Structures are given as C-alpha cells and as structure tokens.
Image (cartoon, rainbow, N blue to C red):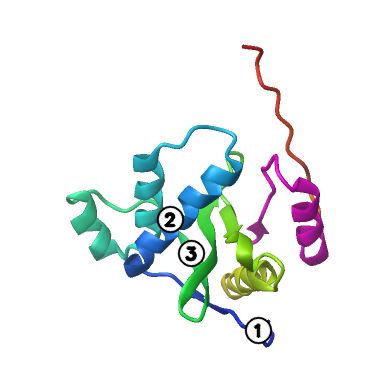
Amino acid sequence: MTTESDYTIRLATINDAGAVFQLCVDLHNENALFPIDENKYQRRIAEILASDDEWMIISGGEPKNRYGFIALAEKNGRPAGAIVLNIEKLWYTEAECLSELFNYVVPEHRRSDCAKRLIEFSKDISDNMGLPLLIGVLSTTRTEAKVRLYRRQLDLVGAFFIHSPRE
C-alpha cells in the first residue's frame, strides 16, 4: 500500500547502477562497521540489478546466482534513497525469504515519508511474492530512531550486538 507522497518509488534497473552505487558509498561513509570492498559491493548490486542476459555480458559469461530487487526512491527525478533486497535462503532452511542488504535515505530526505515508502514498497513485494521480508538495523548512529521506524511498520524478531577486539 502506498500513500500520497513527494517520492516516487520504483524498481531500479541496470541503468540506475551508478545512483545505487553512490547511495551505497554514502551509506558506508556515514555508518559502516567494516571497511568497504568496492568491487564486492558493485558486483553484488550489478548482479541484483541485471537481467540474466545483462549479467552474462557484465560477468563475461558467468551464470547469475544472486537475485533480488532494488527499490529506488526519487524526488523530482533525483535519487533520495534505496532499499536493496536479496532473495535468499537462510543457512538452516530451504525456504526463501527477502532479506534487506541496506535501506538508506539521503540525509536531506530523512524528515519525510521516504524511508516509510521504501518499506511499504518492500512489503508489497513480499506480499506479491508470498515471501517473508527480513529487515534489520546494523548501525552505530541513530540506532534508536531506526529501530522506532521499523517497529512502527514491522514485527520485532531480534537484535544485533557486536564485540570489537582490543587493538
């Protein structure tokens, strides 16, 4: 279900790869726990965005084995945020689910309904596919606000914790 908004939410295509890559870098610069491997994230995003035929060209003939969706939020034709969803099986099951890789909204769009709209769009995909949607917060900044956002729209099923080794 979507509501009236200043944001257009749509499925991204391979033509949107540059915008999605930039959102990923911006997210990492703001909130990363670990160093970024640009080749790794670019490959993962491209594989999700590309059709099977596009991936064969990009990868030099390697079969596609990552599937999912990227919903891109735009305002006045400019990227405002994105949510990346993988279709995957958790380590203990053969049942598929939609698993969020990241949900990022550009800072100037945070006091809006942009993040909510991305979540609504993801829930619609989940409903249409009949697959559970797993979304989490793995963050060291504004964690409580992010948890509140998700709790208003999703059921709470866990939490993340980290121990960083002494240097």
Q: Is residue 47 visible to us here?
A: yes
Res 165 quadrant in image: top right
Compare residues 142 and 3 and report the one nearer the observer.
142
Mark on residue 131? none
Compare residues 23 and 101 and report the one nearer the observer.
23
Amino acid carrying label 3: it is Ile
Mark on residue 22? 2
Which numbered disc, 2 or 3, marks the residue closer to the eye?
2
Badge 1 is on which residue? 5
Residue stretch rendered in magenta on the structure: 130-155
- Residue 44 lies left or right of residue 73; in this view the side is left
Badge 3 is on which residue? 70
| Mark 1: secondary structure | loop
| Mark 3: secondary structure | strand
Res 129 quadrant in image: bottom right
Q: Residue at x 43, y 60 (%)?
A: 20
First along the sequence among labels 2 and 3? 2
Label 2 close to label 3 by CB (< 8 Å): no
Q: Residue at x 58, y 61 (%)?
A: 106
Q: Categorize mark 1 by other alpha carbons within 10 Å: few (<14), some (14-19), many (20+).
A: few
